[in-house]
Image (cartoon, helix red, strand yellow):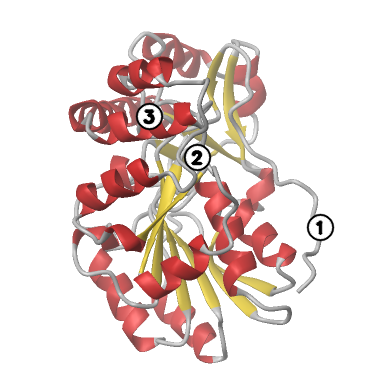
Amino acid sequence: MRLQPQQPSVHGGAGAGIDLSASLNPLGPSPRALEAARSARLDRYPEPDARSLRLAAAARHGVAADAVVPVPGAGFGLWLLAVALLKPGDRCVALGPCFGEYARSAAIAGAAYQEVRATEPNFAWDLDVLMTELRSGGAMCFVGNPGNPTGRAIAASDLRELCSTQPATVFVVDEAFAAFGPGAISLLEGKLPPNAVVVRSLTKELGLPGLRMGYLIAEPTIASRLAGVMPPWPLSSTSIAAAVAGMEDLPHIERGASLARVHIDRIAEGLRARDLNPVPTDANYLLVWAPTLTKALARRDITVRNCASFGLPVYVRIAAPTPADLPRVLDAIAEIE
């Protein structure tokens, strides 16, 4: 199989001033993770298979260690799944609008790609439509839970039913923002369906996007296949140390998720006061139809995520700000004409 080069996707996280184009823990970096990263030995090679991260993730979710595949971030995990499990000509279906790396990863593997898009204004997904599409054939199905950029989540029970009705499809469930969502949405809160792979990012919940760290959880046969095509030393010593310490810092993750909900609610109130109607969200960000908002906030040195790359050119996604930045963001929204 020869991989097909693709143009890079558009992402947030490089804005000036107050950057709300990337959705991170509003408390900032986990102190325990940050300290562990600073203390990591840099004069030695890291673990060739990031074993410490594998064991920490297995303990966190109550799964076998051989079900965990450490990866340098969720984006790498999506790429790995596509190139390891897809063949040229395979069909991929995704719930959209969604993260651009789903389409790009499928294209790199030479697979066909199609989105089943939610409808405006609330962007609630119709799983019956997805099921109908998969009956026509689907080697892989990408589901963001919560979805990006909509923030809408799906109950884990509904996902389990979907997996059981389509046993020939590998369901890639992207839980990059699940730590910020409500309960009962993660497939890791119960027995993982044998045809599902969960993608987890640690950079968001630990507030450390500069360290690439995450993991995949899958049935051991699939996990072994994924691990078997990974190069040695997939993560640096600093990333492994931060990931292990950060997964033990559950209070920081939980406080950040709780604070994010409060801040997103405050921003939603401010937007509604300006006659803007944000989409209901289960994540640490919200989506809103606001054609001029990106430029209006940029003039106040606040960066938000323009959603043109999601096929939503008149929408913006706004992440939960830090406590220090929240008043300035609310004031800026209140001043918008």
Mark 2 sits on what residue? 288
Q: Mark 2 belongs to which amino acid?
A: Val
Question: Circle 1: is it few (<14), some (14-19), or many (20+) Cα within 10 Å?
Answer: few
At x 42% / y 30%, what residue is drawn?
24
| Place of residue 45 in the rendered image (x, y in percent of width and height, measured from the top left) | 52, 32
Quarter where residue 300 is shown: top right
At x 43% / y 39%, what residue is drawn?
286
Q: Mark 1 belongs to which amino acid?
A: Pro
Q: Nearer the viewer, mark 3 or mark 2?
A: 3
Of the pair 84 and 22, the residue shown nearer to us: 84
At x 41% / y 81%, what residue is drawn?
128
Cα gap from disc 2 to disc 1, whole angstroms: 33 Å
Mark drawn on residue 241 = 3
Residue 118 seen in this snapshot: no
Q: Nearer the viewer, mark 2 or mark 1?
A: 1
Q: Does 81 appear above or below 252?
A: below
Q: Nearer the viewer, mark 3 or mark 1?
A: 3
| Place of residue 91 in the rendered image (x, y in percent of width and height, measured from the top left) | 64, 80
Cα gap from disc 3 to disc 1, whole angstroms: 33 Å
- Left or right, residue 122 beside residue 21: left
Q: Mark 3 belongs to which amino acid?
A: Ala
Residue 226 seen in this snapshot: yes
Mark drawn on residue 5 = 1
| Place of residue 204 in the rendered image (x, y in percent of width and height, measured from the top left) | 42, 34
Question: Circle 3: is it few (<14), some (14-19), or many (20+) Cα within 10 Å?
Answer: many
**Mark 3 touching mark 1, by CB under 8 A?**
no
Of the pair 282 and 277, the residue shown nearer to us: 282
